[in-house]
Image: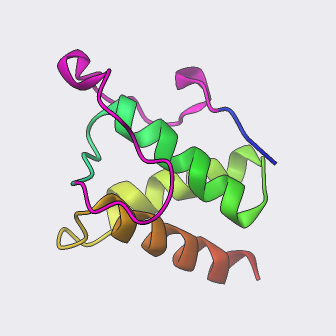
């Protein structure tokens, strides 16, 4: 299943850092590049990958992922790989 998230699907509004738009984004592990949780161009590929991994297209799950990423994810989680693992683990627990 491949999900496509559009900016209008997101609950929160994120800045678009256009100077980084063309740089490679998260496409799977391993990826030790830093994750910018305040850049729409970083957030969308990450949320798509997490939702693909957990196997859902539910908008309520997308909103919960955003809440977790913004409000609950510790600041020491900084790489794309760490963010992916954290979101999959936390949402996976809540969906069981």
Q: Position of residue 5 (x, y in %)?
A: 62, 32
Instruction: State the residue at coordinates (18%, 18%).
Output: 19
57 or 82: nearer the eye? 82
Above or below — where is 19 with respect to 51?
above
* Residue 43 place in picture, x, y as percent: 41, 41
Relative to 34, does residue 79 appear above or below in the rendering? below
Q: Locate residue 82 relative to residue 86 in the image: left or right.
A: left
| Quarter of the rendering containing residue 40 | top left
Q: Is residue 88 left or right of residue 86?
A: right
Which quarter of the rendered picture does the C terminus lie within?
bottom right
On the image, the x and y values in percent for residue 89 come to 55, 79
The magenta span reads 5-33
Which of 90/42 is in front?
A: 42
In magenta stretch: residue 87: no
Q: Is residue 20 magenta?
A: yes
In this view, the residue farthest toward the right is: 1
Residue at left offset 35%, top offset 35%? 24
Q: Measuring 23% from the left and 23% from the top, which residue is drawn there?
A: 17
* Residue furthest top in the image: 18
Q: How many marks?
A: 0
Tell me where residue 41 sits by quadrant.
top left
14 to the left or right of 92: left
Please tell me which residue lies in front, 3 or 13.
3
- The secondary structure making up most of the magenta span is loop
Which color scheme is applied? rainbow
Q: Does residue 52 appear to the left or right of 32 in the view shown?
A: right
């Amino acid at each position: 299943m491949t999900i496509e998230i559009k900016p209008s699907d997101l609950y929160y509004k994120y800045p678009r850092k256009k100077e980084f738009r063309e740089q490679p984004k998260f496409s799977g592990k391993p990826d030790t590049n830093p994750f910018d949780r305040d850049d729409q161009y970083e957030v969308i590929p990450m949320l798509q990958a997490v939702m693909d991994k957990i196997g859902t297209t539910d908008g309520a799950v997308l909103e919960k992922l955003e809440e977790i990423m913004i409000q609950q994810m510790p600041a020491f989680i900084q790489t794309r790989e760490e963010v992916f693992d954290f979101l999959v683990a936390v949402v996976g627990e809540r969906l069981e």
